[in-house]
Image (cartoon, rainbow, N blue to C red):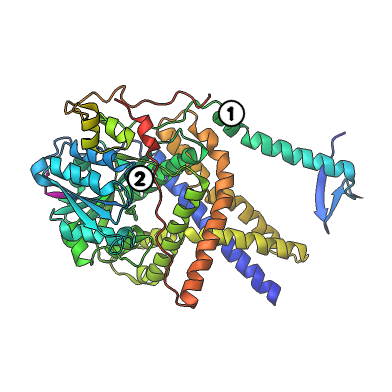
Amino acid sequence: MVFLALQIILVLTACFLLAYTARHCVFTVAALYSLKKRKSNPTFSYQPTVSILIPALNEENVLPRLLHAVTRLDYPKDKLEVVVIDDGSTDGTGTIADEFAAEYGYVKVVHRSPREGRKGKASALNAGLKASSGEFVFCFDADYYPPKDILHKLVEPFSNPRIGAVQGRVTVLNEPKNLVTRIVALERIGGYRVDQYAREKLGLIPQFGGTVGGFRRKVLEALGGWDEEMLAEDTELTFRLYLEGYKIRYVDDAECYEEAVETWGAYWRQRYRWAYGHMQTAFRYLGKLLKSDKLAAKEKVDGFLLLCVYFVPIIVLASWLLSGFLYFSSFEGVVGVSFAIIAISVYSAVGNFAPFFEVGIGAYLDKRTRAYWLVPMFLFTFLYNILICTKAFADLLLTKIFRKRRVNWAKTTHSGNGNSYIQN
Amino acid sequence: MEIVISKIEDKRIIVGGTSLNPNQTFLLTLALTVFTFIFLFLLPSLMELKKPRDAGPRRIEGASIEGLLGAALGRSLRDMEQSFGVQAYSEAPLPAEGLLVFLPSLEP
């Protein structure tokens, strides 16, 4: 009886993994056959007032680069407002922001003391939202470097009143630095050039990624701003927005550089935060998503798979252990078949959630010549992600069981090394 | 001699109907095969890491990258202007071409 139950569980996990394999195949084919990229309106006639929020905690290495870039945006300056939220920095972040504010009338600084700030990005963004006034609110992390015309491209979809938020594409600036940055760059290619792009093309659930994107202010205010209890405030807001009947548009040609993490330790901390926050969101919204009358069936399926994506490595680990146990228990039946299905699915369905072929096709679409030669290295990041997600899941469960305070926001430190790839 | 593993039964490898108990040679061959497979699997990655030919960053079409001297030094605008006695940030737009410099290789 116990063996039968274990067999059924194994088959269910195999089906779960196959669903992801199918999803990634569909995304890859959709991206591949939608080669004609959507081009933004070149006239840029729609020019509402815009606020850019820049949360910054000890970002003196990278903030000048971003502020310099935003002051060079070709958006009309009388319709632009830049709000830097100095979130309790102890380095030169506040001073740098003040100097730019003195130089440029449309740059504002919100100073928060270390006691008042340092409660996470969501809290800083809410402070920025209160201090801003633009009709549309955009967010850029301090380590980003936007091109001149990005605001025009990001604003354009808002001419449709059903659009509540937009998301641009993230590209890694410090890609040549080392293996970590090169792997992250490939993950970004898979995640944006294929995953988000396909979701946009197929009318599914493009996700707001927390940066290089923006919201319609009245929608954001009606939703109550960012949820400060969530570690993945961007994913949480994405689902709150969809459940209210709004849509998110992904704009593939609104590209922006980011400075990726450069060490495996920093990679762990960042991905742990994403995994923990994503799982928090999944627990909160899975039921609501399935019951929603504002979403089409295909959006519910995609939303379900998106919410569960960080559970995949854990399920893979559980499947491995279960398969091994059943195999060595000499129990026959569907086990052998299920084991084969799982084994095949694992490497095709998961590769830090952007599977190998998605990354390969993304690199091909980006006209990369040899970047995808690094795809086999995803084997190691996949194993690494199993550990990260399992730890995040265990911590989340413990937090829920013992009603502890949630895990604190672990800030990513930016070295400013990305500057060396930009030169006069 | 070509060995064809026909089936695995009760954890014993059956070759051509005869049970084959793993001996040292078999285990060594197996280990070498696995090692060779892993090496071949990772070979393209190792080659690209050793001699990067496509290390990025990807050039964003239409991106306009201007003077970033201050940012590169991680210093504030005013400090830098005081130090150098010049206007550090150029107002004049520069063409995007040639401004993004890619490391040609990570080789020393």
Give whichever of A339, B26 is nearer the camera: B26
Q: Amino acid at mark 2?
A: Tyr
Q: Amino acid at mark 1?
A: Met
Q: Quadrant of the C terminus of chain A?
A: top left
Q: Residue furthest left?
A: A78
Magenta span has A49? Answer: yes
Tags 2 and 1 touching, CB below 8 Å:
no
Q: Residue at x 36, y 63 (%)?
A: A297
Which chain letter goes with mark 2? Answer: A
Residue tagged 2: A197
Span highlighted in magenta in the image? A46-50
Residue A148 seen in the current view: no
Q: Position of residue B53 (x, y in %)?
A: 49, 25
For marks 2 and 1, give the CA distance.
30 Å
Tag of residue B47: 1
Which chain letter goes with mark 1? Answer: B
Q: Residue at x 66, y 68 (%)?
A: A7
